Image (spheres, rainbow, N blue to C red):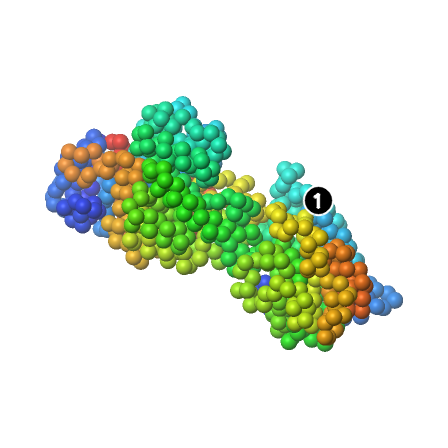
Amino acid sequence: MQQLSVKHLLGIKGLTRADIELIFETADTFKEVLNRPIKKVPSLRDITVANVFFENSTRTRLSFELAQKRLSADVINFSSSSSSVKKGETLLDTVNNILAMKVDMIVMRHSSPGSPHFLAKHIKANIVNAGDGTHEHPTQALLDAFSIREEHGEVAGKKVAIIGDILHSRVALSNIFALQLLGAEVMVCGPITLLPKYIKELGVKVELDVRKALQWCDVANVLRIQLERQQIKYFPSLREYSLYYGINKKLLDSLDKKITVMHPGPINRGVELSSDAADSDHSIILNQVENGVAIRMAVMYLLAQN
Amino acid sequence: MKILIRSAEIIAPNSQLNGQRRDIWIENGIIKNIANAGELPTTEAHRVYKDEALKVSAGWVDMRALAKDPGLEHQEDLYTVRDAAAAGGFTEIALLPNTHPFTQTKESIIYAKTKGNTHAVTVHPMAGVTIDGKGKDLTEMIDLHMAGAIAFTDGIKPVWHSDILVKTLQYLQTFNGLLINRPEDTLLTQFGNMHEGITSTMLGLKGIPAIAEEMMIARDLRFLEYAGGKIHFSTISTAKAVQLIRQAKHKGLKVSCDIAAHQIAFDDTALLEFDTNLKVNPPFRSQADIAALWEGLADNTIDAIVSDHNPLDIESKKLEFDLAEFGITGLETAFALINTYNKILSVSDMVEKLAIRPRQILQLPVPAIEEGQVANLTLFSTELEWTYLEKNIRSKSLNSPFIGQTFKGKPLAIINNGKIA
């Protein structure tokens, strides 16, 4: 049986193209399972997974939990909107307390970049990074690329524009790494203060005009404005942002080709994406959500084999 | 006590003995006799130092260390910081005022100078420029100077307030006092965790841009021209910073600067594994910056090498990267780092930057290796290979990325205040 080259999914950085292809092939199988009348397989029976979320999350946590249940894993959930440090307990102590209850796998979301890498140095359980601050969100990038593959047949050679707050987005960074590994061309677009100064060195194109970005791409991945992650003012107002960077149906219809629109959710309707665009036939947003479960099943299944 | 240093190569720039091998006889802290190598008898000495590659120079001076005493004595105190300094070859150390409470009264100066004063390492406390290091109200600098403050600085914090900076430069002229500033525009570095560049982008960590250091240096130099006085920039880290200071020196401004020894050991790509022991401010920069620092050392734009010793407990480091504190415990590895990575400096150059220039900047007498002079000496080897092991660390804290690393060159002993360590 094929195996992943890693013990943890800490980020897309660290994965090989073969790893991603293996995850996709496995997800294909699980997606088929999810469409059966009986959606459950016994693959992770006797495996206990803890979802440890130090940041608010609805869809990612639900998606992971559903994936775990479909795989017959035992699931426990720990949520804390404030970091455990503020309560006087370190991250390592919190996680070690959970592991002492004989947990095999940790799915963690945390506001600190590198926190799953830190954990990986100190604990034995498999770790899945469900988003670490402004660093990576690997399962989101995998499900995004998987959805592009599903919609367009393959990822290689496709042009993908990532639009919005690139600076604070773990989705952007993981997407760039995954798409490049799979042979896609990547462009980032947004207000210049929300683009990392050195982003070009990652081999991506940079565009400040959203219309030009849309005209260039096959797929537009529209990101959420991460107001909660901005510690400093980066742009004048949401009003100005939506006027000059917001995407609506009229803009999409004015292009000379039909492009695919994606969004990792939750959407700020009327800010980065208008309702008529989000609900149009350009959008594969709900397919992304569906694929998220299959991708997460594949990731946890494969990690449990290692 | 009678001490014999046998057949040691004397490293004393500007002395006729520079590069010569000699026996040195020390009695009760005074150099009694300097003779040809191998001439002096070993029999009467209480202590004999000999090694094939033994070198001796004026004792080294560290211009930048945190002692954490008073306030955080579990990380370091005035006794252990001297032990760590001695292990690093330093006979004198200048301590930053970032204690709790902040070093801003003459009592705190006297406390640091007297606590455990019977040691081979001499402590020189520096005093704060502003009350609590907040950058707003000046401390009583004349009184602090009279009590023995060797220089004025807000330490790990920059003197950011432009009017306070001008007034400090002016006020210190009363007694030819020295302002030491850590150049950092803290508005540009807030929430920053590492050098801003492609690596910080890839790690999703907010960057500390080079320009935050360079703008402050440019600004401070302009104020120096306006206000007069003198300024020492501590722990510079970027190529442009070196260039700005080089230009200012050519102009004749009274400016000097130092780098932290560890600054040349890593570039920013070392942080790819999120190792918090590599979290330091100023951050590890680019290879081009490191190359410029070496050039600056070689052409004497950079006057001194400091330890930037910042001992921290494990609770401050065994954390998520953005929550961990900045700092490395540096006293015991400063020389070994420079000597190991050095490709450009002569031994004399290193001694200039560790022993001579720091004293000139701090207005301390430079001890001469001559008969009749007080012995303030560091014995060292530039060849000896050794491994920095946790069990040998003299500091109370272990926050070093160099544990387990093998170095070339080691301080072997210090002699000062009539004592050896």
Q: Position of residue B219 (x, y in %)?
A: 42, 45
* Residue A140 position by quadrant: bottom right
Q: Residue at x 29, y 50 (%)?
A: B250
* Residue B419 position by quadrant: top left
Residue sitting farthest toward the right: A37
Residue at the disc numbered 1: A81
Q: Residue at x 68, y 54 (%)?
A: A240
Q: Residue at x 20, y 46 (%)?
A: B13
Q: Position of residue B362 (x, y in %)?
A: 31, 37
Q: Amino acid at mark 1?
A: Ser
Kind of element beneath mark 1: loop
Left or right of A100 in this view: B334: left
Q: Residue at x 63, y 72 (%)?
A: A184
Left or right of A108 in this view: B404: left
Which chain letter goes with mark 1?
A
* Residue A156 position by quadrant: bottom right
Q: Position of residue B161 (x, y in %)?
A: 47, 37
Q: Is residue A4 above or below residue B56?
A: below
